[in-house]
Amino acid sequence: MSNGPLQIKAVSGQAGTPPGQGASRDYDVCKLIDVTTCIGCKACEVACVEWNGYPFRETVFDNTYQTMPDLAWNYYNLIRFNEHTTPEGEFQWLFRKDGCLHCADPGCLRACPAEGAIVQYSNGIVDFQQEYCIGCQYCVTGCPFNIPKFNPETKKVHKCTLCSDRVGAGLEPACIKACPTGCLHFGSKDDMLDLAEKRAAQLREHTSHKNAGVYNPAGVGGTHVMYVLHDIENPEAYGGLPKDPRIPLLVKIWKGPLKWLGNLAMTAGIVGVAVHYLRFGPKKTEGGEDK
Amino acid sequence: MSADAAVERYNFAERMCHWSAAATYLYCMFSGLALYSPYLFWMAAVMGGAPQARYWHPWSGLGFVIVALWMHRMWSRAMKLTATDRKWMKEIKAYATNEDEKLPPVGRFNAGQKQFYWVMYYGAGLLLLTGIVMWFPEAIPFRWRLVRSIAVVIHECAALATIGGLIVHVYMGLFVVPGSLHAIVRGTVSRNWAMTHHRNWYRRLAGEPVSEE
C-alpha cells in the first residue's frame, strides 16, 4: 500500500461539484479506540483473524475472561481484560484492545537491520514486509509496547498491519467494521484527535471520570492508533499500557553513535595496518628466511 | 640441528583448533557485520542470504565458543602474561617499528599474541551470554526488557573489540611475520624463524639454557 486512492480535484463535463469535494484531504490515517465504550465482545479479534486468514487459536481458561493470553504472530489484536480498583475504592472492569500503535517514530523500524523489512507509509501505517524479514527479532527489542511476535516455524515476525491492504483500497480496517458499539473509529489523524479530545472532555464534564484523556504518547512522536482512557494518569491499569513509552535509550545508542563509531574504528584499523605496511613492511628473519 | 631444519611449532590438533576457530569466527563476523550496519548488509548475501545468516550466526557462535574452550585447554598456560611480557609491552613501539633487537627474548607466544588470545577468549564469553539473549529475546519477560537492549550493546562492543584484535592478528600473520602463515597451516617453522621471533621457546625446545622469561 503506497498510494491511497487518487482523489479527484476536477472532472471534465461534470454538471455539479466533483464527487468528494470538500472531504478531508488529510492523507495520514488513525484508529481511535474509545475504551470507555468497549464491551469486550472480541468482535474485532474475530474480524482480524478472518480478514488475515489465520485459523482461530485455542483458548485457555484461567478463571478470567482472558481466554487468549497474549498477542501472537497470527493474533494481532487482543482485548485485555483488567480488574482495577481505583484509590477511591471504586471497582472498574477495563477492556482494552491491544495491538500495534503505529508510532510516528517506530522503535521496531529503527532497530530493524534488514533492508525493506519494515516500512512506514506516508499515511502513518508501519508495516512488516515478511518477504524481507530475516527473523532477527531486533524489532522485539526496539518496540516499547511489546507488540511484534515471532513465528518460530517461518522465522518471520508479524504484527497488526492496520489493514494496509484494505486501507490502500479505500476501506476501513477489518476491526473497525466489526465493532458493534462504535468504540472504534477510523479517519485522519486530525479528525481522530479532534473526536478523541471531544470525547475525553465529555467524560470529564458529564461523568465521574475527571482524569479522562487521550493516549497519544509524545515519547514515540505520537501514534496512529490512539486511546481514550477513563484515567489518562494510569494507563498501566489497562493491561500494561506504558505511561511514557520511549524507544529504549540503548537502542538509540546502538542504532546511532555505536554504528558510525564502530564503522569508523574498523575502517581506521584497516587503513592503519595498510599504512603501517607501507611504512615499515615485514619483519626480517635473522640469518635469512629459508623456505 | 642445521639452520634450515624444520621445527614443529603447531601440531595437528593445534592447527585444527585454530582453523576451526577461524572458520566459525569469520562466519559470525561477516553475518554479524551484515546485521550491524546497512552499509555492510551485502555481506549477508555471501553468507547464504540474510535469513540464513541470521539462522546460522548463533550456531556458528556456539561452535566458536566450544572451539575456544578446546583452545583454552591447549594454550591457556602458554598464554599467561609474565613479567617479561610486561617488559615487552613497554617496548611495543620497537616491535611495531620492526626494531625487534630492542625487545627481550620471547617464549612460545609474545605479549601481543597473548593479549589477542585473551580478548578473543573473554570476548567469546561475553558474546555467548549476550548472544543467548538476542537469540531468544521474547524469552526475556517484557518487564525486564532493559536486559534485551543491554545485551545488544554489549554484544556489539565485544564484537568490535574482537574485530579490532582480528585486524591486527590477520595483518601480522599474513604480512608482517613471513613464515607464520606456513606455521599455522603446515605446522613448521625454520630454526632461524624460531630464533628470531620466539628465541626462548626454541632454546627450551632444543634443550639450551633460557636466560629469562
Image: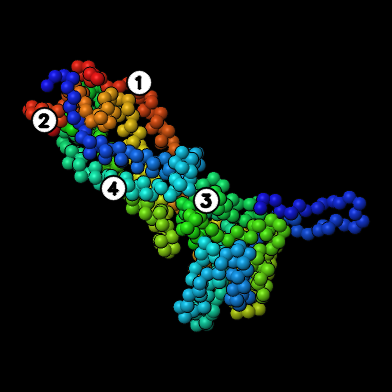
Whether the residues at callouts 2 and 4 have beta carbons within 8 Å, the answer is no
Q: Position of residue B173 (x, y in %)?
A: 30, 29
Whether the residues at callouts 4 and 3 have beta carbons within 8 Å, the answer is no
* Quadrant in the rendering for residue A229: bottom right
Whether the residues at callouts 2 and 3 have beta carbons within 8 Å, the answer is no
Residue type highlighted by circle 2: Arg
Disc 1 versus disc 3: nearer the observer? 3
Output the chain of dot 4.
B
Q: Relative to A124, is A91 on the left or the right? A: left
Residue type highlighted by circle 3: Cys
Measure the alpha-carbon separation of dots 1 and 4. 39 Å
Which residue is label 4 attached to?
Answer: B66
Which residue is label 3 attached to?
Answer: A133
**Same chain letter for marks 2 and 3:** no
Output the chain of dot 1.
A
Q: Is residue B25 at all visible to an observer of this figure? A: yes
Q: Relative to A237, is B119 on the left or the right? A: left
Measure the alpha-carbon separation of dots 4 and 3. 30 Å
A93, above or below A186, in the image: below
Q: Position of residue A61 (x, y in %)?
A: 47, 77
Which residue is label 2 attached to?
Answer: B204
Q: Position of residue B38 (x, y in %)?
A: 50, 42
Q: Identify which residue, B4 or A157, lies in the foreground.
A: B4
Please give the label number shown on residue A279: 1
Q: Quadrant of the C terminus of chain A?
A: top left
- Whichever of callouts 1 and 3 sits on the residue coming sooner in the sequence is 3
